[in-house]
């Protein structure tokens, strides 16, 4: 099992990074944000709900981000390696009444996600 985990670690790190950047982009309103790739993620975040593509899109990371957000929304695996790193902090905020369900709103608009 540990060998399999090591095999998928680079992909998991990329998925974690993308989810965290997208989460940041949902609330960041700074025009000159210093977070690396923030502007790109804001553009991607605004693009995805209107994109009808399911396999090819000219916007970098669109299809893979749709897939990842769709998984994040529908995943019911408690210790999921792909989304747990983001889900646990969001669940803590939700329990404190601070979660604004931005992911849910955008994921619901992503009717063309492919799992």
Image: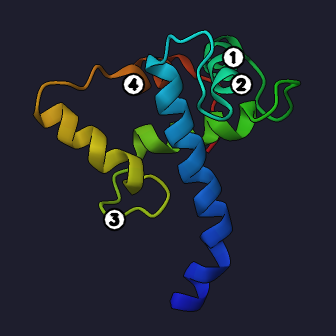
**Between marks 2 and 1, how big is the CA–CA gap?**
5 Å
Q: Residue at coordinates 64% horizontally, 54% vertically from top-left? A: 14
Label 1 sits on residue: 43
Residue at figure coordinates x 34%, y 46% from the top left: 87
Q: Earlier in the sequence, mark 2 or mark 3?
A: 2
Are circles 2 and 1 on residues that touch, CB within 8 Å? yes
The residue mark sitting in front, 2 or 4, is 2
Q: Compared to 33, does 88 lie above or below?
A: below
Dot 4 falls on a residue whose secondary structure is helix
**Secondary structure beneath label 3:** loop
- Between marks 2 and 3 in the image, the one whose residue lies nearer the viewer: 2
Residue 66, quarter of picture: top right
Element type at mark 1: helix
Residue named by callout 2: 40
Decide: few, some or many residues near mark 3? Use Cα within 10 Å; few <14, some 14-19, many ≥20: few
Which of marks 3 and 4 precedes in the sequence?
3
């Amino acid at each position: 099992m540990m060998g399999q985990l090591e095999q998928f670690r680079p992909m998991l790190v990329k998925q974690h990074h993308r989810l965290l950047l997208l989460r940041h982009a949902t609330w960041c309103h700074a025009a000159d944000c210093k977070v690396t790739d923030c502007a790109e993620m804001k553009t991607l975040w605004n693009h995805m709900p209107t994109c009808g593509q399911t396999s090819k899109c000219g916007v970098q990371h669109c299809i893979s981000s749709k897939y990842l957000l769709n998984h994040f929304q529908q995943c019911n695996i408690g210790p999921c390696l792909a989304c747990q790193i983001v889900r646990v902090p969001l669940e803590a905020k939700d329990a404190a009444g601070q979660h604004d369900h931005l992911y849910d709103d955008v994921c619901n608009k992503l009717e063309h996600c492919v799992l």
